Image: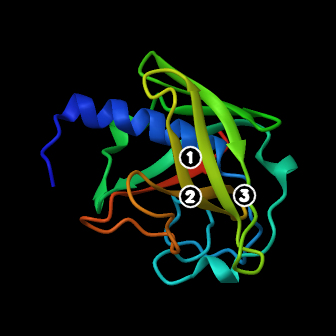
Amino acid sequence: MTKVSRDAWRRRFIWVAILSAVAFFPVACPAQQDSASSPKLPAANKQDVETVRPFREDLLQGEWKVEKVKFAGRDLPGEDLQTMRLSVDGRAWQNTANGASESGVFEFPATQSGDAQHVNLVIEKGESAGTTLEGIIRQGESGFEVCYAVSGERPRHFESNEGSMNLLISYVRPK
């Protein structure tokens, strides 16, 4: 894997977080909470997207903050998450972090695996304009989770292991 500077990684994360926030159309799933500070989301790393129930777009509308980010097996430090916000209006989204902003639309291609929700995050404005990320999305009791492939094919599981180039993001409502 090519070594990327911390600033380049942050910039790439910002557009991925924005994309994933927009592409995160919620999928209702049985909730399981790993810790008191985490949103109640289905267990990651074990659930295949084929077991995810249909999502409801109306539950994605409004403002969101990033609770947790994992990229290629590494957690983004908590202090880097403080300014990350996602705003969803219809299928349009805008992601902001550290003064930078990106925006675009969500696309929901037909799926071939039951009710699994596939999502494409189309970035129209910002540093990564012209980029589309393929991913999967699900919703829990207090937030939603999205997993995008930064390179390679669409993820089948909500996980980001070392070397995978998957971006796993958890969102919750700001307090």
Which residue is at 62% across, 76% downward? 49
The residue at the far top in this view is: 99
| Mark 1, residue position | 20
- Taking depth in this image into account, of 79 and 20 the one nearest to the observer is 20
172 relative position to 158: left or right: right
Q: Quadrant of the N terminus?
A: bottom left
Q: Earlier in the sequence, mark 3 or mark 1?
A: 1
Which element type, helix, strand or loop, lies under badge 1? helix
Q: Position of residue 172 (x, y in %)?
A: 63, 48
4 relative position to 32: left or right: left
Tell me how far mark 3 sits from mark 2, CA to CA: 10 Å
Three-letter code, disc 3 = Pro
**Residue 109's disc number:** 3
Q: Position of residue 173 (x, y in %)?
A: 67, 43
Which element type, helix, strand or loop, lies under badge 2? strand
| Mark 2, residue position | 135
Q: Is residue 92 above or below residue 127?
A: below
Please identify, in this view, whether the residue under mark 1 or under mark 2 is nearer the observer: 2
In contact (CB < 8 Å): disc 1 and disc 2? yes
159 relative position to 27: left or right: left
Three-letter code, disc 1 = Ser
